[in-house]
Amino acid sequence: MSPVTAFIDLHCHPPVKAYLEGPFAPYLDHVAAIFRRPVQMMEPEELADLYRSLDGRAVLLGWDAGTATGLPPFTSSQVAELVAVAPDVFVGFGGIDPHRADAVDQVDIAADAGMLGLKFHPSVQRFDPADPRYLDIFARAVAHGLVCLFHTGYTALGSGMPGGAGVETEYANPMRLDSLAARVPELSIIAAHPSWPWQDEAIATARHKPSVWLELSGWSPRRFPPALVEAVTGELLHRSLFGSDFPFITPQKWIGDWEQLDIAPEATRRILHDNAAELLGLADDRGDPDAGG
Ligand SMILES: [Zn+2]
């Protein structure tokens, strides 16, 4: 076995030129300071080689906050091009701008491009996911069997910039996902990141709504509040997912810090791999006979 258990990283921002110099361009200097590491641009093949060398797979996230930010998107077809470089390693989620008049069509386009899910960032995009005017988008996601991943809690994007670069954090309160889950019960919802300052709200939402999953990217596990560790290794063990938030945190760093927490290996395997494989319907083709059990 490799140094780390095989994993599926639910949260990888592709650090390719069109992404870093597109929708992330204005934020990068501040974000690099917050994570205390420079953001390194990579070629798609390099990114694939990194994950392959770690026995991992990556969910590459598209991005479209064009209406709120005026910045260019990283489209589903751009994500699909990356997936095509290394389909053994990459899967894709499409970024949907909910304000676009053709947002529902964009869901169709994402599905046609082979995306397995959709990514939303309510505080950067400035929208309330539970607002009835967006429910058609999520109904279409259900029709295509696409899971929806939402940023929750504080974000490094815009942090320290004047007016937080227009980001309104309150939209990323996980209680909005509780309401969405009540209104669209068939939708699989991923609440991304420890949801500070609403960690209890995220745990309560996942406990109350069986369609809500907690994804753990963006923070070192050494800084997780004890209640979160207890929840994801206990009651919510089957709805907890690993994500790194690459390139801001590497999977090696996250998993290395997780291993300091002394979690049972079966629970680690569930969180790093099995839950995501089940949620996304990814057959384990990495040659591990224990997978999927
Ligand atoms: Zn992220």
Image (cartoon, rainbow, N blue to C red):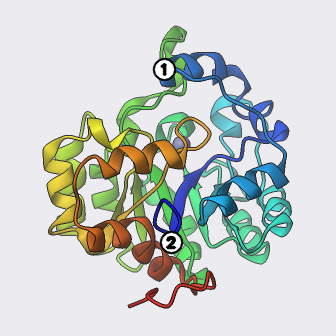
Q: Is residue 120 left or right of residue 73?
A: left
Q: Is residue 210 above or below residue 121?
A: below
Image point 79% across, 72% down: which residue? Answer: 113
Reading the image, the residue beneath label 1 is 34
Q: Is residue 128 visible?
A: no
First along the sequence among labels 1 and 2 = 2
Q: Is residue 241 left or right of residue 89?
A: left
Give the CA separation, mark 1 to mark 2: 34 Å
Image point 50% across, 13% down: which residue? Answer: 163
Q: Residues within 10 Å of mark 2 (few under 14, many from 20)?
A: few
Q: Is residue 25 left or right of residue 214?
A: right
Give residue 139's position: percent from left, percent from top: 52, 74
Image point 68% across, 38% down: which residue? Answer: 67
Q: Nearer the viewer, residue 7 or 78?
A: 7
Label 2 is placed on what type of residue? Met
Q: Nearer the viewer, residue 248 or 127?
A: 248
| Mark whose residue sits in front, 1 or 2 | 2
Q: Secondary structure at mark 2?
A: loop
Quarter in which the C terminus is drawn: bottom left
Reading the image, the residue beneath label 2 is 1
